[in-house]
Image (spheres, rainbow, N blue to C red):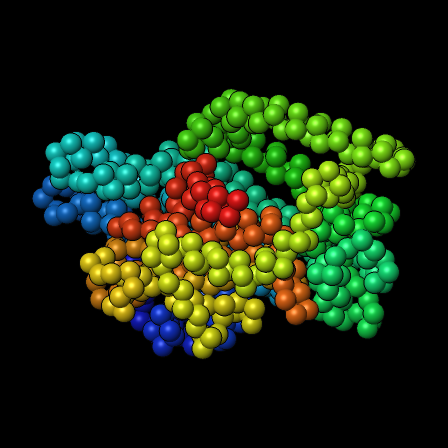
Amino acid sequence: PTTKGTISNAAIESDNPLLRSWSDQPFNLPPFKHIHTEHFVPAFEVAMAAHLADLEAIASSPIGESCGDIFASILGAYDRAGALLSKVDSVYDNYTSSLNTPDMQVVQTKMAPILSRHNSKAYDIPGLFEKIEIIYEMREEKLKSGKWNAEQARLAERVYIEFVRMGAKFDVVTKGEYADVQAELASLETKFMQNVLKDEEDWEQVLTEGDMDGCPADVIAAARQAGIDRKKGPDDHVITLGRSMVEPFLSYSSRRDLREIVFEAFSKRGELSPERDNLKIAVEMLRLRKRQAQLHNKKSFADYQFEDTMAQSPENGMKLLNDVWAKAKDAANREREMMEAFLSEKGEKLDGGIQPWDWRYYAEQVRQAKFNFDENELKPYFSLDAVTKAVFDVSNKLYGLKYLLRKDIVAYHPDVNVYEVRRAKKDGAVDSDDDELVAIFLHDNYARAHKSSGAWMSEYRTQTKNLAPGTDSIEAIPIVSNNNNFSKGSENTLLSFDDGVTLFHEMGHGHHGMLSDCTYEYLASTNVLKDFVELPSQLMEHWLR
C-alpha cells in the first residue's frame, strides 16, 4: 500500500525509469536518456493504481473536529495525491507535444481513453466528494474565524468546483454517460492533433534557389537547412508548414503561384489527406461537447466553459470579440486600401484582386515603399541568441533571476538548453554570490519533426510547499519548459520581430511557473482561470514591443 502523496517502494525499485526514484539525476530531473516509448504504458498502470489508492485512503479517513487537522488530512492530502502519476504524466504530456514520434503516437492513441476514464474514476471514489463538500461548506466560517487562511479557502472552493464540473453530483447512470463522452472526446482530440502533426511533417514544397526570388538570405538559408534536414538534393530548398517558415515566405516571395500553394496548405492542415479528415472529427467533437453541456443542464458548451472564467458568460465573451472585431475590420480595410493604391501606382493588376496569400506580401511592399521600413534590416539584431540574452536580461532586471546554462545536463533532444535559475536570497543583495535555486528551465526553440506547432509553456514539476514527510526538498522546485518553433538557420537563426515577441510571451508564462509561491500545487503556477493565464505573458511581451 502507498502512503498518501508518496511513491511506493515497488515503484522506486522498478527497472522502469519512469517509476524509479530520480534522485540520481541533477535536481531530480527526469532521466531523459533512459526513457523509451515502451516504458509509458506499464508506468501508467502502476501510477494510476497508486493514485486511486491515495484517493481511497482520503475517502476512508475520519472527519470531524475531534479528528485533528481535517484540512490537512483531506485537502492537504488530496493536493499531494497521485505523486507518481504526476511524475509519469508530466513526461508523457511533454513528449506528446515535443517528441511525438510515430511510436509515441501509438501509445498516445491507446492511453487517451484510458487516462480519461481514470480521471472520471478519480472524481467518483465512494465517500470522497462527500468529504470535499463538507470542507467546502465550512470554508467561509473557517476563513472568518482565522482558522484558515485565504489560500486554504481558495483550495476548498476550487477543488469542490472541479468535482462538480466533472459530474460528482450526477446520478450513477449520468456519471457513466459522462465518462463515455469524456473518453470519446479524449480519443477524438488526440486524433485531431495527430492529423495536424502528420500534415505538418509530411507536406513540403521543394524549390530551387531561383524559386525563392524575393526572399531574404535568412529565409533562403532556413529553407536550405530544411532541405538538408529532410535529406533532399544538394540544391533543394524546402518550405515546410512551420509558422516561422510560412509567414516570411508569404511576406517576401515574389512568386504568387507558390504563395497560394503554401497558404492553402497551411490553412488546411488536418485535411490535406483523405485519411486525415479533421472536419468529420470536429463535427463529432461538437456533438459530444453539446451533450456534455446538456448533462450539466447548460444551453451550450460555451455556457459550460465560460461559467468557470472571469468573463463568466458567452455574452460577455462575444461582446469583447465584437468590440475588437469592429476595430480590427476598420484597420484591415484601411490596410487593404493602401495596398490597392500601391498596386494602382505601380500599374499592377491582380487576377481576382488581393487574395489571402497576397496580403503579407503587399503589406510588406507598402511598408518599404511608404514608410521606408524593411524588417530585414532589423533581423541581424534579432538572432535567437541575442533575443534570448535580452529576455534573460529583462528577467534579471524585473525579478533578479540569473540563468546558468548547464551543458552537462542531457535533455530529451540535443536542441534543448537546460538552465539553472537562481536569484539572491531575499535578505541578500542582487549581485551576491549567496543565492538560491528558483527553478530549472528548459528552452526548446526550434521547429522539427514530431513536435507540435505553435509555442507553449509546460512543466515537468510544479512548485509546491505541500510535500509529503520525508520528501526531498528539491521536489518543491519547479521544472519549467518553454517551447517555440523557430526555423533553424544553417549558421545563425534570425528571428522576425513577431518571433521575438513570441519568445518574450512564453517567458511570461515561464515566469508564472518559476516564480510561483503557493503552498498547494493545485493552485500553483498556471493553475488559474483560463482567461487570466495569459496576463503574465501579455505583460512580458511589452518589454520588447
Task: Work out whether residue 391 or residue 444 is closer to the camera in this orientation and state it.
Answer: 391
Is the residue 276 above or below the residue 295 in the image?
Answer: below
Question: Residue 272: percent from the left, percent from the top?
Answer: 77, 49
Residue 429: quarter of image: bottom left
Question: What residue appears at the point 37 percent right and 63 percent down from the top-left corner?
Answer: 402
Task: Work out whether residue 165 or residue 503 is closer to the camera in this orientation and state it.
Answer: 503
Q: Is residue 94 visible?
A: no
Question: Residue 44: percent from the left, percent from the top?
Answer: 46, 62
Question: Residue 526: percent from the left, percent from the top?
Answer: 40, 47
Task: Work out whether residue 143 or residue 439 is closer to the camera in this orientation and state it.
Answer: 439
Query: In this rendering, would 37 be left or right of 137?
Result: right
Question: What residue appears at the point 75 percent right and 41 percent down from the top-left corner?
Answer: 369
Question: Residue 278: percent from the left, percent from the top?
Answer: 69, 44
Question: What residue appears at the point 68 percent right and 69 percent down from the top-left corner?
Answer: 490
Quadrant position of the N terminus in the picture? bottom left
Q: Give the mark count.
A: 0
Query: In this rendering, would 483 be left or right of 146?
Result: right
Residue 397: quarter of image: bottom left
Extreme-front residue of the structure: 372
Q: Is residue 241 visible?
A: yes
Is the residue 166 above or below the residue 36 in the image?
Answer: above
Extreme-left residue of the structure: 66
Is the residue 140 above or below the residue 63 in the image?
Answer: above
Query: In this rendering, would 524 be left or right of 336?
Result: left
Question: What residue appears at the point 57 percent right and 27 percent down from the top-left corner?
Answer: 324
